[in-house]
Image: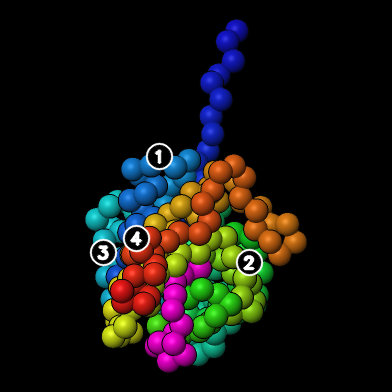
Amino acid sequence: MTSPPFSFSPRRIVILISGRGSNMQSLVRACHTEGWPAEVVAVVANKPGAAGLAWASEQGIATACVPHREFAEREAFDAELARVIDGFQPDFVILAGFMRVLTPAFVRRYAGRLINIHPSLLPAFPGLHTHAQALAVGVQVHGCSVHFVTPVLDHGPIIAQGVVPVLAGDTANDLAARVLEVEHQVYPAAVRWLVEGRVRLDGEVPLVAGVAQRLFLHPMLLHTEEVLHGD
């Protein structure tokens, strides 16, 4: 009697968004085109009008909304959000522009499976308005960080980072657009490592098995001296 062929169950991903979900879209596209051993099974938003929900639905992905304004307490919102997420039985929960601070209980529920991308080179500039913060102090490079989510806001172990130059005359919008370009490279790469089982935590340090480029540079940084000094 011949044994049945080995069957690998794809990793199940739930993505949380608050708006148009450009990072969500980059993850969905990469999952399909690169043949990840995974499936984005649902996209969940905290705002009914989030444009990313319509896009996900057009791709045949299940969607749900848990409007945060319907809950008087953050704990109640997080409990309902977790109930909805768990209905999709995810292996990983990916935050892609999800603009809510999550409670410690929620974070602990998905410990080691909850990932975020933050628009700064953490630990610099946690929180909001990161691009304006970077310009205000005069940094020469800026970027984004993919990290495990912990109860301390924007301070989880970093899996990968993307770096962009800060140019003379940049506005916060200019810098945000440049950072978003590299976010769309870094986040799919890091999430792919996760679903392939290549990322593990050694204490507080994420380690990626195999050859992995964990620092992603914007193309303009190939000419760093010219960009930064205007020669």
Residue 198, percent across and down?
Answer: 60, 46
Mark 4 or mark 3: name the one nearer the start of the chain.
3
Residue that carries the numbered disc 1 in the rendered image: 35
In the displayed orientation, state which residue is furthest to the right.
203
Q: Which residues are magenta?
A: 132-145
Q: Is residue 208 visible?
A: yes
| Of the image marks 4 and 1, the number of the one nearer the N terminus | 1
Mark 3 packing: few (<14 Cα in 10 Å), some, or many (20+)? Answer: some
The relative height of residue 132 versus residue 52 in the rendered view (above or below) is: below
Mark before the other along the chain sequence, 4 or 2: 2
Q: Nearer the viewer, mark 1 or mark 2?
A: 2
- Specify whether residue 41 is painted magenta: no
Of 134 and 2, the residue lying toward us:
134
Task: Give the image location of residue 7, x and y in percent.
Answer: 53, 29
The residue lying at 36 percent from left, 53 percent from top is 28
Tag 3 secondary structure:
helix
Task: State the CA–CA distance, disc 4 to disc 2.
Answer: 26 Å
Query: CA gap, disc 4 to disc 1?
Result: 26 Å
Q: What residue sits right under mark 4 in the picture? A: 219
CB of mark 4 within 8 Å of CB of mark 3?
no
Residue at disc 1, secondary structure: loop
Nearer to us of marks 4 and 3 is 4
Query: Identity of the amino acid at label 1?
Result: Gly
Whole-angstrom CA distance, mark 3 to mark 2, is: 32 Å
Locate residue 32: give its quadrant.
top left
Identify the disc placed on residue 157.
2
Q: Residues within 10 Å of mark 4 (few under 14, many from 20)?
A: few
Where residue 100 sits: x, y (%)? 48, 80
How many marks can you see? 4
